[in-house]
Image (cartoon, rainbow, N blue to C red):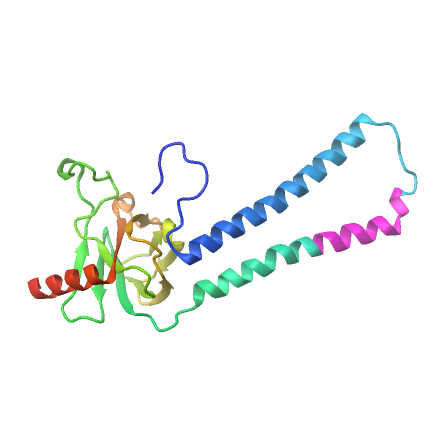
Amino acid sequence: MAHPSQLGFQDAASPVMEELLHFHDHALMIAFMISSLVLYIIVAMVTTKLTNKNILDSQEIEIIWTVLPAIILILIALPSLRILYLMDEINNPHLTVKAIGHQWYWSYEYTDYENLEFDSYMIPTQDLAPGQFRLLDTDHRMVVPTESPIRVMITADDVLHSWAVPSLGIKLDAIPGRLNQTAFIVSRPGVFYGQCSEICGANHSFMPIVVEAVPLKHFENWSYLMVKDA
C-alpha cells in the first residue's frame, strides 16, 4: 500500500498492474528524451551566435520533424493498445463477484455461491484495532483466491461511484442501472486497499475497498464458513 512521501506507484499485485508500470517507465523515458532534446536546442540557440540561413527552407528538417514525432507516437501507442486489450480480456473466470456501490458503503455478492453476500463499511476511527488503517480498513473484506481469474461486475444503487484498487490496476465506474465488468488475477497473497474514486456525496471519502487475496484452500474454507453462517 502507499506510504508517506512515496514516489511512484504502489507495488504491483497483478499482471495488468505490472504491465502498466512497465508502460509508465517506457513512456516516461521517451518524454525525458524529448525534454532533453528540446532543452539542448534552447540552450544552443541562446548561447551561440551561429545561425543557419537555410533552416527556414530546409526540406531535410521538414522531413525530420514530421517523421520523428510519428515514430514516437507509434512507439507509445502500440504498447498502450496492447494493455488496453489485455485489461478488457475476460477468459473463463473461476470466480465472479458483484460489487454494488451505495451511499456510502460497498456490498458484495458472490454469484457462484448461494447466500454469500455482505455489506462492507469503513471501520470508525474509535473502533480500529492495532495494525488497522484509518479511513482504509473495513468490517468485511472482499476475499478472493490468488492466481485465479476473478471477474468483478460493478454497479451502483443510487449515484455514480468508482471501484478502484491501485495495486491491482483496477478502476471502473459504478453506474446506476448499468453493469460494468473487469477481470484480474492476484499474483500473491496480501491485503490491498482502494477507495471510491468518484465524488458521490458528503461521505465520499469514507468508502474504502479492501481486497484480501488468500490461497485457494483458505478461500474455500472462508466461503464455506460464510455460507454456513448466512
- In x, y percent, where is residue 207? 26, 48
Instruction: Indicate left or right for 19 with 43 as reference.
Output: left
- Report the residue at 35% width, 36% height from top: 3
- In x, y percent, where is residue 183? 37, 64
Segment colored magenta = 55-70
To which quarter of the image does residue 42 belong?
Answer: top right
Seen from this angle, which residue lies furthest bottom?
92
Front position in the image: 113 or 57: 113
- Asked if residue 171 can be seen in this view, the reply is yes
- Asked if residue 157 can be seen in this view, the reply is no
Q: Magenta-highlighted stretch: main secondary structure?
A: helix
- Report the residue at 36% width, 66% height from top: 181
Q: Quadrant of the C terminus?
A: bottom left
| In magenta segment, residue 171 | no
- Report the residue at 26% width, 50% height from top: 210
| In magenta segment, residue 69 | yes
Instruction: Indicate left or right for 85 with 184 as reference.
Output: right
Seen from this angle, which residue lies furthest left?
229
Q: In which quarter of the image is the N terminus?
A: top left
Instruction: Indicate left or right for 226 with 31 as reference.
Output: left
Instruction: Indicate left or right for 61 with 93 as reference.
Output: right
To which quarter of the image does residue 125 belong?
Answer: top left
Circle count? 0
